[in-house]
Amino acid sequence: MSIITVVVILIICLLIFSIFIDAVAATPVLNVAAGLLLVILTGFYMLPTAIHIMRGLPDASGKFWINFLLGWTVIVWIWGLVTACITESKKVKKG
């Protein structure tokens, strides 16, 4: 799974969640603030997957779906973050 695929999926999620922002925010300023908060929280939520992809670890699609579906449990999110950080990368070092 490429980083472009992850970005597209995140954009789709943000568009779906933006429906709820309109129901909560009463003014344009609150809409912008709620949108920025949503972008920041979504990026933080998907942090284990982003680290996994950027380090070139295998099975990024599996990591994405586990994080996307079970990351809200916090335990799985922490597990994903720890495994993304400590698993040895298979990228070839140039030099």
Image (cartoon, helix red, strand yellow):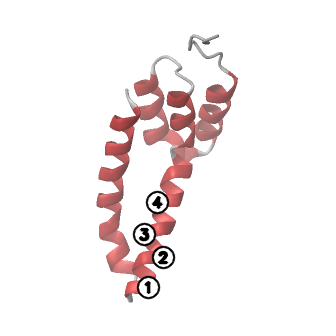
Please, what is the three-letter code of the amino acid marked with disc 3?
A: Gly
User: Where residue 57 sits in the image (x, y, percent)?
Assistant: 53, 19
What whole-number distance in Å separates the C-alpha atoms at marks 4 and 1? 15 Å
What whole-number distance in Å separates the C-alpha atoms at marks 3 and 2? 5 Å
Q: Quadrant of residue 89?
A: top right
Q: Secondary structure at mark 4?
A: helix
Q: Is residue 22 above or below residue 72?
A: below
Q: Secondary structure at mark 3?
A: helix
At x 57%, y 25%, the residue is: 55
**Quadrant that contains the C terminus:** top right
What whole-number distance in Å separates the C-alpha atoms at marks 4 and 3? 6 Å
Name the residue tied to disc 1: 29
Name the residue tied to disc 4: 39
Name the residue tied to disc 3: 35
Name the residue tied to disc 2: 33
Q: Quadrant of residue 5?
A: top left
